[in-house]
Amino acid sequence: MKRNIREVIDYVEEQHEGKCKVISAKIEKSFDDLDVEVNVWNVKTDKEGDWWVVEGEDLPMNLYPQEAFYMTSDEAYSFHVGLMRRMSAREEYQPEDYVKAASLGIEITPVLFRKLRNISEQIEHAKEIEDFQAIGVQCREILIELGNAIYDPAMAGQEEQPQKSNFKKKAEFFTRFYLNDSDSSDYRSYIKKITEATWDYANKITHSQNTTVYEASTCIALIISLISLYENIQHKIYDPISQFICKNCKSKKVTIIDDEHKEDSIVTKLYIKCEECGEITEVTFKDNEYGRIKYIIEK
């Protein structure tokens, strides 16, 4: 059923056990693309920050912290509807399918994929607080495993090596190592915020006495998304062509037509042709000061 403003205010204050007061609440955006009206409310409190509250016909109401997840109203809507659909389709639910769908088809390392599949299956049977706390613990362990999977000691440079379980530091070194150019500064900033928020939320689930299946599901979804994010960075590094734009017409529709390589088959130069205007660009591969490949576009 559709909620009114009083119900939304009461819901937010009850979820915080009366520790805050709602100072404003308004519908930020409404959606009807699924043949039902769904509203995303922008709710501000005096002590507990700002929240998205999503509600609509035949959908349970839930809230999402704006600051922690860095969500827009559109993302909160998509996130909520996806969780609700999954909860309503338990009988046909396959954890493996959920992980693949949530990760947008990005390949995930076998160890992490297995662990994600396990906790996605556990959420379907979780009932007690201890069940949800156990899921939080496993989410945190998966993040530590992710840190170990993406990190190489060389990434720290001259800095002190992070402890084995220091996921956030390893993630920071990894991001800085691969995305060190000035054009990636905003990208690095967003990744850092999402990484820290996901780690903090997994820790919150681990100790919370008020967790429901929705918060635990949110935590799992964040973990899957974060793993996909780091997999995406690796794909970006090994897919230099995706970064090029035709110097003549600015199109990104380019095709490799030839290459030059050393005797050991390491490519040193590519010849790329624009599908729009036919411009041919030479791309030279060289090591930079970090010992990694950089790409120099030449005519």
Image (cartoon, helix red, strand yellow):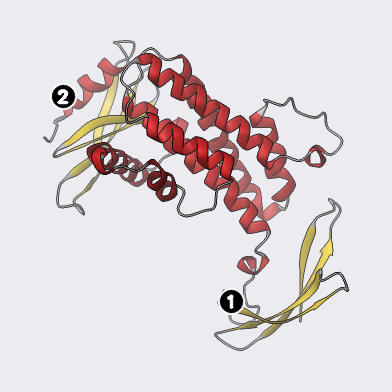
Q: Which residue is mark 2?
A: 6
Q: Earlier in the sequence, mark 2 or mark 1?
A: 2
Please tell me whether residue 32 is drawn above or below residue 285 in the rendered image: above
For the residue labelled by badge 1, is the local secondary structure a helix, a strand or a loop?
Answer: loop
Q: Which residue is mark 1?
A: 250
Mark 1 neighbour density, 10 Å: few (under 14) some (14–19) many (20 or more): few
| Residue 65 in view, yes or no | no
Q: How many marks?
A: 2
Quadrant for the N terminus in the image: top left
Please tell me whether residue 47 is drawn above or below residue 4 in the rendered image: above
- Residue 79 location in percent, x, y? 35, 42
- Residue 222 marker: none
| Residue 172 in view, yes or no | yes
- Residue 89 location in percent, x, y? 24, 41
Outermost residue to the left: 1
What residue is drawn where x is 60% and y is 78%? 254
